[in-house]
Amino acid sequence: MTEEYDYDLVVVGGGPAGSSTAFTAAKSGIKVALLEKENSIAETVRTSGVTWIESIKEFEIPGNCYNPIKNFSFVSPNNEVTISDSIATAAVLDVRKTYRWLAHEAEKAGADIFVKININEVIKNENNDIVGVSGTGPNGKMIFHSKVIIDATGFTSVISKAMGFVTQWKRFGAGAEYEAKVENVDPDTWWLMVGQEYTPAGYAWIFPLGNNIIRIGVGVGKPESDIDPTQRLKEIIEKQLGPIKKLGKITPIEFHYGLIPNDGLSRKTVFNNLILVGDSAGQANPLVLEGIRYAIKFGRVAGKVASDAIKNKKTDADALYPYEENWRNAIESKINSAGKVQDRWIGLSDKEWDKELDIIKELKTEEFLDFIKADFGLSNMLKLAVSHPKLAVRQLFNLVKGK
Ligand SMILES: Cc1cc2nc3c(=O)[nH]c(=O)nc-3n(C[C@H](O)[C@H](O)[C@H](O)COP(=O)(O)OP(=O)(O)OC[C@H]3O[C@@H](n4cnc5c(N)ncnc54)[C@H](O)[C@@H]3O)c2cc1C
């Protein structure tokens, strides 16, 4: 049996980007469908869920969705640094709870949520512009006609690929992690672990969720390394490397695996009747490969721009361009700078990592936070490139400045 629907806006993908787009679009009064292929929103977790309290407050994410973090520890083969703050500035999200809250907000605003729908085809008009999508649902084929479609399918970018607008990301991060119960962990402190033994191109992490639960994982840059992150994760746990030893017995609760684009902001993100948002648009901070706050922030922008365009009955690429202009103005130069630091980090030997941690030790808390968030320019960071007494620090920040 074929089911057929008509909507103003169809959002494909019920991750943070899709739910946030559906939320603002439905709030503005247009008819919105949010389509998710899994049995429920956030059935599979593919992320470590670290984000920033500032963003949590901006998005009004409820307090029971996250564990606040005050201390940021880095460990390299022969060095260690902890940057501490008096108040919590970062957080580890309960990913499932947060993503379901985002979807519920969209539903409350009036969006219709469909789960168990795997979208695999696009519908085009005589000009080859997208005017709908189709796929398989619980009862057979489902067709959705729509004035604007949002590709929020994440890394796979299903809709943009089906339109022939994009190909597979070439440079990306692959990550594997356990959510696990441990014997000892400080709930206020996260750990980033760098060097060849942890991972040859990337970093490993311990992110606490409270109640002696952690996410422990390994990320590997592709194509720079052909290491399998799952295998490497098992090895570093078995060897009890660095801070892992202090955790005591590690009892896995759930395994997570995911891919995140790391090709820079290379994609065009608006086409006639189509917007790409979140990972499908490549909106991620390459330094620590975090994209949740961008997915939510620019999802909300996409929902507003799409609904304005639909109300004005003009939904071509020009009409949708304010979305691309908005996110590029907000993050393009920061992401480009972060990409340069990442290029430097990916090539560091163990000895060089030990030295890099000495540079990080020189940073004040707010400078470190702006740095790791890729919020270059917010503090006096760029002044560091000129006036810091240590040459190595000046060199690092000159890189950020692009010199
Ligand atoms: C290992 C790892 C760790 C990470 N850690 C962090 C972190 O600590 N902090 C951070 O901010 N970011 C992190 N990220 C990145 C973050 O997860 C992404 O940037 C974010 O999830 C992007 O959201 P999204 O909505 O664009 O895509 P996704 O979260 O991938 O959501 C896409 C949704 O679309 C659905 N979908 C896909 N195809 C179809 C289809 N054909 N039909 C219907 N539905 C479909 C999927 O099931 C999914 O629900 C990490 C990524 C990885 C891989």
Image (cartoon, rainbow, N blue to C red):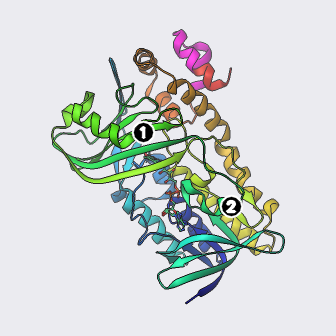
* Residue at the extreme bottom: 1
- Image coordinates for residue 45, horizontal then vertical, percent: 39, 57
State the CA–CA distance, disc 1 to disc 2. 29 Å
384 in magenta: yes
* Residue at the extreme front: 226
- The quarter of the rendered structure image containing the N terminus is bottom right
Please determine whether, in this image, residue 165 is positioned above or below residue 263.
below
Crowdedness near tag 2: few (<14), some (14–19) or many (≥20) residues, C-alpha within 10 Å = many
Please determine whether, in this image, residue 222 is positioned above or below residue 155.
above
Disc on res. 309: none
Disc on res. 219: 1
Residue 380 seen: no
Please determine whether, in this image, residue 93 is positioned above or below residue 124.
above
Residue bounds of the magenta highlight: 380-396
Q: What residue type is labelled 2?
A: Ile
Kindly tell me whether mark 1's CB lies below 8 Å from ligand 1: yes
Label 1 secondary element: strand
Observer-nearest of 321 and 390: 321
Which label lies toward us, 1 or 2?
Answer: 1
Q: Quadrant of residue 237?
A: top left
- Image coordinates for residue 361, horizontal then vertical, percent: 41, 20
- Image coordinates for residue 372, horizontal then vertical, percent: 49, 33
Q: Earlier in the sequence, mark 1 or mark 2?
A: 1
Q: Which residue is denoted by mark 2 in the rendering?
A: 275
Q: What residue type is labelled 1?
A: Gly
Label 2 secondary element: strand
Residue 279 seen: yes
- The quarter of the rendered structure image containing the C terminus is top right
